[in-house]
């Protein structure tokens, strides 16, 4: 049987060995990071070392970083109670807070003129939320230009940077965002730990209160092992950015186009991170492709949201003006530093076989 191929890095990245070792060391030790004795101080050191590593990657003061249970908590903390203007392609943990949505064009890029106009029209809007990189299409938003508009109107900017970690330099984003969210498991750390970056303590109201942890910005005993794993994974972000996965993405898309003249690549023509491709072909439903590839032990994802067994068109693709029927065919392939050309060749062969069968049925 062929070896499994994992091409769903945007959902979660494989745990890095350095993160595994850091977590094991923390789990083998004992101590509450809030305790003043030796074991407690060792636990505290692990937390602060991880915070310092992440701060160096972001070029910010470590005191700006609050560890959370993940990006959803970080987004919720940043946006709760605010009048939020969000892009139309945000992750659900951001979209749920949106009072209004900024349109995007057919490539998935935010309409900057609309952003400017909407902020001028509604004085109640206090926070603008724009993700750095879209999780489905890989499209990179012009965060610097967004920040200029938002700050000119005297509003705060929240950036979901989850999919940017390891693919873009995060420091320029952190420099202009008032708040920013990260998730460890997207960059090779453990699941269940994330971070919120704050310019100051007035940017967010704590969701969890009681204890003095995280400078009273997030109460509760710290998950020391997960935080240690987060720090170890973050230490390798620069290496991740240097990995040439874009050549694999380009080879994939060239191979798909050579096989299918009616293929659509979503976000093509816009700036994209090198690891992500979202594509579809008419009359080749995403659920059919996902099941067939899974039987071939190839793990990819769909551009559609699945709820109660019913596949619905992706809100991201619908916001880009994609027809709902076409949106239901969208497949997302996302790669990482350990992905290989052999992985792409197997995917092309398996997907091509499905496509050829569809063409024969239609003939």
Image: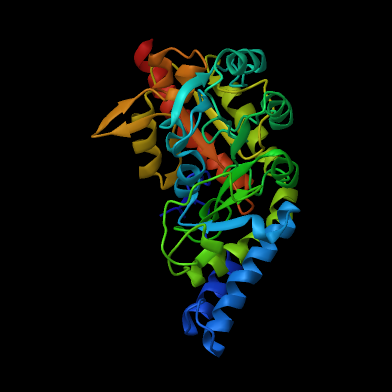
Residue at image location 52% in from the left, 37% down from the top = 333
The number of numbered badges drawn on the structure is 0
Q: Is residue 195 above or below residue 102?
A: below
Residue at horizontal 76 percent and vertical 53 percent from the top: 59
- 319 or 343: nearer the eye? 319
Q: Which of the pair 300/150 is nearer the observer?
A: 150
In front: 153, or 24? 153
Examine the rendering and report whether any part of residue 235 can be seen: no
In the image as oriented, which residue stretches furthest toward the top?
A: 363
**Percent from the top left, x then y, of residue 189?**
54, 60
Name which residue lies at 75% across and 42% down.
Answer: 172
Q: Residue at x 45, y 18 (%)?
A: 318
The spot of residue 352 in percent (x, y) is: 48, 29
Of the 4 image quadrants, the one containing the C terminus is top left
Residue 260 visible? The answer is yes
**Residue 319, horizontal then vertical, whole percent:** 48, 18
């Amino acid at each position: 049987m062929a070896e499994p191929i994992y091409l769903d890095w945007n959902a979660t990245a494989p745990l890095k060995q350095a993160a595994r070792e850091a977590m094991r060391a923390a789990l083998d030790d004992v101590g509450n990071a809030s305790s003043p004795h030796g074991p407690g101080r060792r636990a505290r050191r692990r937390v602060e070392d991880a915070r310092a590593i992440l701060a160096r990657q972001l070029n910010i003061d470590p005191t700006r970083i609050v560890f959370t249970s993940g990006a959803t908590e970080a987004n919720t903390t940043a946006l709760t109670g605010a009048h939020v203007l969000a892009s139309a392609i945000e992750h659900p943990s951001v979209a749920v807070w949106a009072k209004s949505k900024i349109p995007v064009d057919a490539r998935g890029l935010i309409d900057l003129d609309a952003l400017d106009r909407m902020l001028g029209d509604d004085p109640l809007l206090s926070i603008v939320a724009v993700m750095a990189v879209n999780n489905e299409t890989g499209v990179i938003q012009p965060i610097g230009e967004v920040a200029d508009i938002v700050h000119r109107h005297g509003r705060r900017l929240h950036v979901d940077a989850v999919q940017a970690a390891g693919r873009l330099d995060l420091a320029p984003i952190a420099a202009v965002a008032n708040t920013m969210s990260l998730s460890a498991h997207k960059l090779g750390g453990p699941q269940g730990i994330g971070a919120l970056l704050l310019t100051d303590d007035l940017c967010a109201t704590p969701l969890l209160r009681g204890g003095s942890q995280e400078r009273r910005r997030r109460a509760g005993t710290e998950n020391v092992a997960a935080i240690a794993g987060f720090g170890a994974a973050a230490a390798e972000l620069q290496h991740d950015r240097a990995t040439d996965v874009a050549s694999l993405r380009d080879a994939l898309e060239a191979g798909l186009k050579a096989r299918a003249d009616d293929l659509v690549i979503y976000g093509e023509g816009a700036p994209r991170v090198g690891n992500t491709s979202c594509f579809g072909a008419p009359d080749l439903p995403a659920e059919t492709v996902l099941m067939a590839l899974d039987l071939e032990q190839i793990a990819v994802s769909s551009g559609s949201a699945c709820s109660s067994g019913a596949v619905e068109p992706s809100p991201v693709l619908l916001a880009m003006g994609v027809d709902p029927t076409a949106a239901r065919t969208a497949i997302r392939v996302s790669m990482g530093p350990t992905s290989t050309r052999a992985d792409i060749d197997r995917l092309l062969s398996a997907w091509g076989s499905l496509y050829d069968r569809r063409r024969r049925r239609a003939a």
